[in-house]
Amino acid sequence: MTIRDPRQRAVFTGLLFSAMGVGTFASLSLGIIAVVFIEDLGISRAQLGLAFAVNTVGAAVLSPFVGRLTDRIGGRSSLIVVALASATAFVLLGVASSLLVLLVASTIGAVAQSNANPATNKLIAEDLPSGSQGIVTGIKQSGVQAFVFVGGAIVPAMALMWGRWSAYMLFAAFAVGLAAVAWIFLPRSTANDGVAWVRDSSRLPSDIWWITAYGFLLGFGGSVTVLYALFTTERLGQSVVVGGAVVAVVGITAMPARIAWAHYAERRHAYRLSLIVIALLAIAGSAALIMSSSEWWWLVWVAAVLTGIGPSSWNSVGMLGLIVFAGPSAAGRASGVVLFGFLIGLGAGPPLFGWMVDVTGDYTGVWIVSLVAFVAGLVTVLLWSPQEQSSEAVS
């Protein structure tokens, strides 16, 4: 079924936007109210970090399997799984009284996170005509930043006034409502017939592996954003509020950038060109961080903007590209592969970068390693020769 009616498409886009938000918010919320969890559960920062790792690594490991499963059961069923797994994780986070329950919640959250992109990409490939997939992909990818922004505004306040359970139950109720709307509104997938359960042994297009390699490098280099607030306060001498604002700028600029990049890439068939420019913006952002100092501290704002419109937005183009190159039949499987590469890079960076700062007492080495990763990403996409070369607006 192809969705063409504007009102139906608006509901469809809202469902995908919300699914991306709830599917990734469980782990991201740990950072938003990290202090509350540490105090309530009596755990250390390292133990809270373990919960992050369980979620990120778990989602990476699950992604290839979940991607194949999505191709078999269809995007509708997969999105409902995302919503219900998210709701379960939110409930457990709200009532958790021990590290064990926190780890269980993170594990279930990993199921939701690993499924969010395959489910939404599959639905776009199945139910939207070419020409309208780009802007919807960009909007649904911006759902992650939108939920972080909204969650950052309401979760701490609710946790302080009524306890963290109140905030998490609100998000759990939203996730259950999302599952109900998806069940009623979304068309049943053609993947639900008997043939869909036959294992697909066909090879993915080589383009998917190039995008995966690029995603790993951009994820690894882009993971330095976890240090932006700390760097701003510790090395640039600014307040905690300013440090938080720097991180917020990354998220706020990434939201419209993801929509714009995906729309441009589809309209111009410029997937490769878009990824080249994004890598160049990432390199420029790293250079700004290297040059920043207590006298030139304002360069951190430049870096934040370049990060938002650059590496933090690459996946809107990457996810749209895999939809185009893999097609509806393999969109879920391709999503799982690309997501695996991205999450491995995203998860490997912070421990290494934190260790480098602890050992050297300086951030310069971190920015240089990030810069090298972005340069490697640029080289990767320059070497990539897409199969749809004729449609690439690179010249």
Image: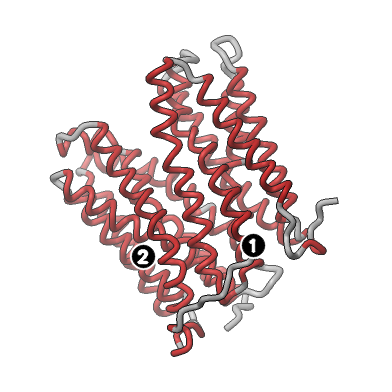
Judge from the rendering whether residue 302 lies leftward or rightward of residue 54; answer left or right: right
Height in image: 188 above or below 384?
A: below
Q: Amino acid at mark 2?
A: Ala
Judge from the rendering whether residue 280 lies leftward or rightward of residue 89; answer left or right: right
Q: Quadrant of the N terminus?
A: bottom right
Q: Amino acid at mark 1?
A: Ser
Q: Residue at x 13, y 45 (%)?
A: 97
User: How many numbered marks have been drawn onto this rendered protein structure?
Assistant: 2
Judge from the rendering whether residue 30 lies leftward or rightward of residue 321; answer left or right: left
| SS class, disc 1 | helix
Give how far across and how far down residue 387 sits, in percent: 73, 64
Q: Residue at x 75, y 65 (%)?
A: 388
The image quadrant that residue 281 belongs to is top right
Q: In the rendered structure, are the residues bearing label 2 and label 1 in contact, judged by CB atoms less than 8 Å apart?
A: no
User: What is the spatial separation of the Cα atoms under label 2 and label 1, in whole angstroms?
Assistant: 32 Å
Taking depth in this image into account, of 354 and 289 the one nearest to the observer is 354
Height in image: 162 above or below 299?
A: below
- Mark 1, Cα crowd under 10 Å, few <14 / some 14-19 / many 20+, is some
Give how far across and how far down residue 134 sits, in percent: 65, 62
Q: Residue furthest bottom?
A: 194
Residue 83 tag number: 2
Judge from the rendering whether residue 164 lies leftward or rightward of residue 208; answer left or right: left
Q: Residue at x 48, y 44 (%)?
A: 345
Q: Which residue is mark 1?
A: 206
